Amino acid sequence: MSRFKRFGAALTVMALAAGCDSPPAAQNTNSAALRLAGQTVEVAATWSGTEQANFRAVLDAFTRKTGAIVRYTSGGNDLPVLLNSRLAGGAPPDVAMIAQPGVVTGFVDKGQLKPLTADAVAAVTANYSDAWRQLGTIDGQLYGVYFKVANKSVIWYRTDAFADAGVQPPKTWDEFLTASETLADSGITPMAVPGGDGWTLTDWFENMYLRVGGPDNYDKLARHEIPWTHPTVVRTLQMLVDYWQTPKAIAGGPKGALQLTFTQSIADVFGATPKAAMLFEGDFVAAEIAKLGKTTVGTDAKVFEWPSVGGSPPGVITGGEQAVAFKDNPAAMALIAYLASPEAAAIVAAKGGFLSANKNLPASTYPDDTTRQMGSAVVNSAVVRFDMSDLAPQLFGGSTSAHEWVLLQSFLANPSDPAGTARALEAAAVKDFGGK
């Protein structure tokens, strides 16, 4: 079976209804604590700064419960490179937090990952819906749990800018275009587009495509079962270019957007000297807004869902870091079981800038209504799809030099030929997906 077809369950419409199961009883009894005391477990992830500090609080709580010492290793911007290097040297970390399902599948194919043991499986089963369990399942075995997830289908906006222009959060794409025009006419640049980071452009495409092509075509394109030259892809690219090329719609125009980084775009909207009213990106923007300290999430900074296109139903593009084990020692499996608990999720959720797919995490744990809104959509939306670029082979969608990233950046810089860009994407996909 193709490694990418194994993600069929991950790509189906996911009804992530919150359950009423009770959280599992604490598994770390005194005997368990004695059993793990003195043991060391290494966990590798990409997080740094605030995200690393928040995760460190979770790891410290695990240490207090079990006695196991946790060593955190940062993999920087390209964790798979670190992991492959460590594997080649015969010294992988015990646990890793991996964002790309395709990378996880590759490790499974090589026999490098360990299926979760019974206690870890029980913790995941108690706290996650079947749809989210399937996202961590390969060939019928559970390999991981999604500890941190993202809602990548929200558009952030400054409430004062909307109030000054007299616009309301739009619900349809036509309303979005009208709101952007009204903002521009009032002297406020509508949107900051951080095209300097190619991954943000894949999120633009995926959200538009889910609504233009629909969930079934999204699944097929993610598996490369339809070509990137499909009419729905070309139409999606055309709608993006129509917006990006609209005079005064995006800060700096297309060429200026290509120089704008993700971090700077947040400052350009929510910093001391705002240059635009809106920014499209995920819930994780909240943590950066808090660091700027100029606006407050839920008051000055709010979100609305990606607008409906042609009557399309609400949908969420999600992503997230999956905890997987390269070793099946007791401390590694106990850590993964703990990460699957509502207790662990609550530690970070209360700090902001974090969403969980844990169905037993009380919504009240989140620090504000805006975050609760985004978290509820991840758990309860009838249509949820995993980030398409993360599902793709790494050469196509999973690194700074990935073909999709580079081609979409080129398209933003010179947004004149959607059909030509579709042909270039298809040529790259044929190569990167192994001729599929």
Image (spheres, rainbow, N blue to C red):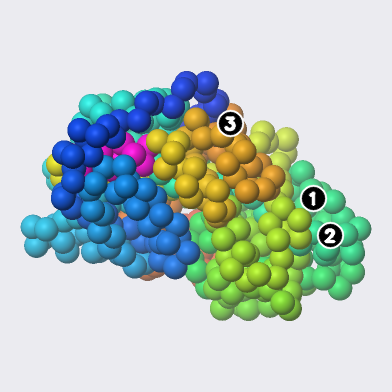
Q: Residue at x 56, y 78 (%)?
A: 259
- Specify whether 192 is left or right of 323: right
Per the image, the residue denoted by label 2 is 162
Q: CA distance from mark 1 to mark 3?
A: 21 Å
**Residue 169 numbered mark, or none:** 1
Q: Choose the circle earlier in sequence order: 1 or 2.
A: 2
Q: Residues within 10 Å of mark 3 (few under 14, many from 20)?
A: some
Which residues lie in the magenta part?
330-340
Q: CA distance from mark 2 to mark 3?
A: 28 Å
Q: Is residue 336 magenta?
A: yes
Residue 323 in view: no
Q: Nearer the viewer, mark 1 or mark 3?
A: 3
The amino acid type of the residue labelled 3 equals: Asn
Per the image, the residue denoted by label 3 is 380
Q: Position of residue 49 (x, y in %)?
A: 44, 68
Q: Quadrant of residue 344?
A: top left
Q: Is residue 246 magenta?
A: no
Q: Position of residue 200 (x, y in %)?
A: 53, 61
